[in-house]
């Protein structure tokens, strides 16, 4: 996935360096390192400070919820009467153990993810090999297949899968970048507590289809309740408007028709992927479903591919491939 993000930039450097793929990859990694360093110097310290402060104050905030004191604080701001505040406080204090247990589960999951961050160091190393030799890997695979027609079929299939994955990964990166800027800017303007930390978390969660934005909304609204933020209705309106922009403007523009999945299928696939493989399943469920759709459609079009080959026996392999790819990318009937 990381290699798909960097491949367009590597191609640009390769054109500028006149075909030197290795130097193009090195230049891309150097530029990426400079961008990460600039981000770390300018915004990174603020994010880390707010995240550290949030980690210190979060136990106290959860204690206010478990003891029911949050009901008095929130109810007095919203004009609740004393009876309602007392009822909510008794309800929260009566379920204190369950609240503490859920909070502990979330903390353990976060600690487990943090403990696996060391494996992220392997990503740029493996991506460098994929960026350099991905075409060679595909050619070796195709040489294992007997028959020109079968080889042509798998080459067209690999091209379609490659285009779909590239579209998906680059779109998700764009969602994350836009989310980081939008959430951080709005939360700063609204004087929301922990704006930089929450904006960074929201940007990362944009990588996960459907579930990520939902978790972001719950996290921000929950933090508004815990901290006693008064303008929570404005925050709710922003979350709804931003979700509409992402789903109905940004997503169609960036995704185009690359995935061709119904929203209902996406929701079901994400939920199933989360149950099967956790966080990884949430992220990979959408490209996996799109890949299975491409494979199914290519398999159904295989008889038509043979008919084209018989009708034009003198056509070159490239021409047949181009026609087949064009047919394979037509929308379903």
Image (cartoon, rainbow, N blue to C red):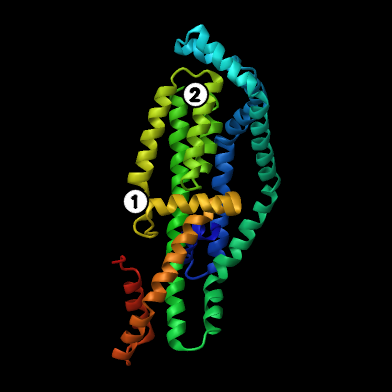
Instruction: Give the residue displayed 38% in from the left and 36% down from the top.
Output: 242
Instruction: Give the residue displayed 66% in from the left and 57% down from the top.
Output: 122
Categorize mark 1 by other alpha carbons within 10 Å: few (<14), some (14-19), many (20+): few
SS for tag 1? helix
Categorize mark 2 by other alpha carbons within 10 Å: few (<14), some (14-19), many (20+): many
Q: Residue 175's spot in the image, x, y percent? A: 44, 46
Asked if residue 312 can be seen in this view, the reply is no
Nearer to us in this view, 60 or 49:
60
Q: Residue furthest top?
A: 82
Asked if residue 333 can be seen in this view, the reply is yes
Left-right relation of 103 to 212: right
Q: Residue 123's spot in the image, x, y percent? A: 62, 57
Question: Mark 2 highlights which residue?
Answer: 192
Q: Residue 42's spot in the image, x, y percent? A: 55, 35
Question: Mark 1 highlights which residue?
Answer: 252
SS for tag 2? loop
Q: Quadrant of the C terminus?
A: bottom left
Instruction: Give the residue displayed 53% in from the left and 50% down from the top.
Output: 282
């Amino acid at each position: 996935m990381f290699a798909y993000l960097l491949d367009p930039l590597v191609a640009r450097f390769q054109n500028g360096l006149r075909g030197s793929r290795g130097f193009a990859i090195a230049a891309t990694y150097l530029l990426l390192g400079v961008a990460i360093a600039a981000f770390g110097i300018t915004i990174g310290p603020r994010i880390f400070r707010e995240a550290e402060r949030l980690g210190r104050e979060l136990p106290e905030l959860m204690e206010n919820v478990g003891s029911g004191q949050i009901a008095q604080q929130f109810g007095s701001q919203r004009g609740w009467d004393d009876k309602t505040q007392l009822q909510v406080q008794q309800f929260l204090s009566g379920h204190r153990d369950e609240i503490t247990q859920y909070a502990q589960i979330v903390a353990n999951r976060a600690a487990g993810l943090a403990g696996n961050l060391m494996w992220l160091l392997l990503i740029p190393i493996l991506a460098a090999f994929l960026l350099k030799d991905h075409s060679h890997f595909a050619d070796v695979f195709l040489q294992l297949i007997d028959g020109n027609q079968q080889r042509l079929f798998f080459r067209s299939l690999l091209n379609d899968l490659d285009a779909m994955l590239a579209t998906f990964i680059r779109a998700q990166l764009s969602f994350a970048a836009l989310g980081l800027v939008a959430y951080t800017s709005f939360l700063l303007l609204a004087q929301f507590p922990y704006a930089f930390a929450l904006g960074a978390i929201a940007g990362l969660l944009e990588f996960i289809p459907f579930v990520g934005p939902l978790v972001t909304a719950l996290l921000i609204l929950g933090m508004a309740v815990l901290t006693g933020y008064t303008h929570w209705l404005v925050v709710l309106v922003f979350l709804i408007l931003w979700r509409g922009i992402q789903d109905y403007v940004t997503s169609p523009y960036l995704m185009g028709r690359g995935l061709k999945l119904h929203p209902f299928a996406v929701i079901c696939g994400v939920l199933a992927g989360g149950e099967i493989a956790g966080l990884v399943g949430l992220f990979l469920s959408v490209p996996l479903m799109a890949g299975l759709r491409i494979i199914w459609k290519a398999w159904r079009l295989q008889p038509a591919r043979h008919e084209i080959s018989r009708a034009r026996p003198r056509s070159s392999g490239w021409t047949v491939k181009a026609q087949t790819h064009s047919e394979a990318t037509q929308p379903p009937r």
